[in-house]
Amino acid sequence: MTTAITLVQGDITRQRVDAIVNAANSSLLGGSGVDGAIHRRGGPAILRECRALRASRYGRGLPTGRAVATTAGELDARWVIHTVGPVWSADEDRSELLASCHRESLRIADELGARTVAFPAISTGVYRWPLQDAARIAVTAVRESGTRVEEVRFVLFDERAYAAFAARLG
Ligand code: APR
């Protein structure tokens, strides 16, 4: 079964999918951008589970490139899969960590039995990763993942991000 990769320009918190991937930070305690939007619209149940994860398995925070699932709270999804993208660096190639965010999120989606998964353009906001390069890494990682997810939907917030991803799928 092949995975359909689709693109949508819009707000990831309004997607009706099984799992929504959050561009989190290692604290798992919220932030701005996608992270802020997911916690705002998803409500306190998400943060409660994130706090429980910090109190148990992730005492020192979720490492970059790893992913963990919580409830989706009030969102139109069953789960939020939180992943921590790498901050872009001119001196160090962190591409493998960005690829890992996608592979690990899909591995967890498969464990959960999620069939549709929405991804934001991880690391391309506060973490300053150039859009074209992030799109290349993200699409390649999904294509090579071997996931059983039926639809991976990249939800891009603006025209520029949409165009960057569309250029990779063409
Ligand atoms: N829906 C879809 N995409 C969005 C939304 C939204 N509601 N809000 C922002 N984006 C886009 C941004 O335009 C950017 O292209 O998501 C991409 C990722 O941007 P960020 O959310 O800033 O995530 P990232 O660059 O991975 O930085 C993560 O930011 O919010 C904090 O706590 C978070 O410290 C972490 C850091």
Image (spheres, rainbow, N blue to C red):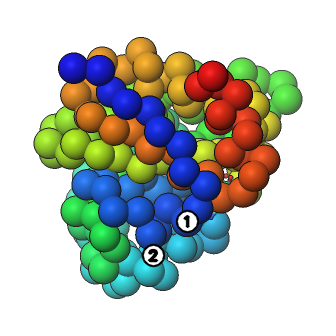
Disc on res. 78: none
Q: Amino acid at mark 2?
A: His
Callout 2: CB less than 8 Å from ligand 1 = no
98 in relation to 128, above or below: above
Q: Quadrant of residue 76?
A: bottom left
Q: Residues within 10 Å of mark 2 (few under 14, many from 20)?
A: many
Quadrant holding the N terminus: top left
Residue at left offset 54%, top offset 73%: 37
- Note whether residue 55 is visible: no
Q: Amino acid at mark 1?
A: Asp
Disc on res. 11: 1
Residue at left offset 25%, top offset 55%: 18
Q: Nearer the viewer, residue 112 or 54?
A: 112
Tell me if 42 is positioned left or right of 8 in this view: left
Closer to the chain start, of discs 2 and 1, is: 1
Q: Which residue is mark 2?
A: 39
Q: Measure how far apart labels 2 and 1 are at the Cα level.
A: 13 Å
Report how many numbered discs are placed on residues in the image.
2
Residue 19: x, y in percent? 31, 54
Callout 1: CB less than 8 Å from ligand 1 = yes
Residue at left offset 59%, top offset 45%: 122
Tell me if 127 is positioned left or right of 41 in this view: right
